[in-house]
Image (cartoon, rainbow, N blue to C red):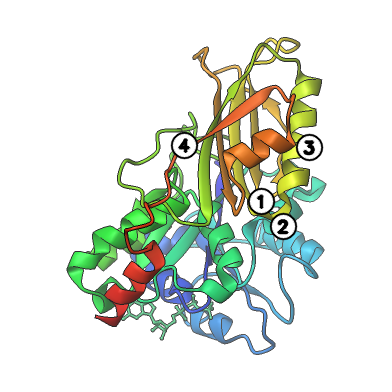
Amino acid sequence: MPVDLILLSGFLGSGKTTLLVEFLRHEGAGDTGVIVNEAGEIGVDGAIVAESDVPMLELANGCVCCSLRSSLVHTVSALLDAPRAGDRPPLRRIVLETSGLSRPGPIIASLADPELAARDLRVSVVSTYDCETGLAHTEQFEEAAAQLAAAQRIVLTKLDRVRPDSIAMHRDAAAGINPFAEIIAEPDRTRAVARALACAPQAGDATGAARFPIDDSVSAAALPHPRIHVMKGEARSAMQWPELALWLDDLAGFCGERLLRFKAIVHVTDCADPILIQSVGTTFGAPRPLRSYGADRDVFVVITRDIDAEEINTLCAGGPVRLVNQLRRPPREQPGLLSRLVATHAA
Ligand SMILES: Nc1nc2c(ncn2[C@@H]2O[C@H](COP(=O)(O)OP(=O)(O)OP(=O)(O)O)[C@@H](O)[C@H]2O)c(=O)[nH]1
């Protein structure tokens, strides 16, 4: 039975620990183990979570994405190997609560370790979006955007602290950063919490890195963000893997930290099966053939910050893929998204 490793990400104070603790209070959470990582020295979150009756390990005194790579791998292994108490169901899920300033990409990269390769782990990212502050974290927008863009699920938090009629706008704003994520804007908190940390369906991608098939339909309601660009791609003509690999290198090189998410299923002439390629940030997983993908159509989805399809096409001129912007920025005469969200918050 696979174990879901859920990276619980989200900006500082956006409600990660609160969500986790509420989840752990449910009867159904007995199959869960928890790893808490905090940037600071005092393990406040760990102490709060430790009140719950589930196996919990803490990665303190550092940031999981830089200094603690090997301890993360050991900690995950330790939880997987820990004997289960007699009345406890088998471990099905590990929730790793990351520090509010961590980017998910390097954490996912650190999990690509031989020690974990043989384990049946399915990694996914769940991010919290704080409706009280909306996207007004302008000073640390890069981290917040990276966390939301990496997510398979985005949970809107603090719905009880904003006007009910503003919730749809927050949902659309979250979709504007990541229109491919499942957005949980559920006023019923119990249901929201259960959906947020539910295990992925068994038929899902075995590497857990993505929902499969990749859904590239952009939500019509997604509110374009002035700095986030969502694009689709198309092959200019039939291509070989080395050409595509070179283009991916260029894409990551030119965008750097501005590349937030890449997902594609692509046909290349030198491989019989379509190839699944993904990145969170510039961290690319190993490409792999996807025999079960029945369609002829290629799918490319790219989410970036501060660089759009035209700029990338120009920088990667002559490459085998052409990108097309999907979400149009708001017209100039309309108030910007940020000011609308801030205005809602102030109201
Ligand atoms: N009213 C309300 N308050 C919430 C909700 N979620 C979180 N809070 C409060 O927001 C504050 C921060 O919540 P935490 O759960 O600690 O946030 P966090 O993301 O874990 O914070 P860091 O670990 O510092 O990044 C706490 O005072 C919570 O009680 C919510 O849905 N409604």
Q: Are marks 1 and 3 in contact (CB under 8 Å)?
A: no
First in residue order: circle 1 vs circle 3:
3
For image coordinates 35% across by 75% down, the residue present is 342
- Give residue 202's mark: 4
Q: Are marks 4 and 3 in contact (CB under 8 Å)?
A: no
Q: How many angstroms separate mark 4 from mark 3 (CA)?
A: 33 Å
- Give residue 106's mark: 2
- In the rendered view, would you say 36 is above or below 208? below
Q: How many angstroms separate mark 4 from mark 2 (CA)?
A: 26 Å
Label 1, on which residue?
A: 281
Q: Is residue 207 visible?
A: no
Q: Quadrant of residue 99?
A: bottom right
First in residue order: circle 3 vs circle 2:
2
Q: How many angstroms separate mark 4 from mark 1 (CA)?
A: 26 Å
Residue type at tag 4: Gln
Q: Are marks 2 and 1 in contact (CB under 8 Å)?
A: yes
Q: How many angstroms separate mark 3 from mark 2 (CA)?
A: 17 Å
First in residue order: circle 2 vs circle 1:
2
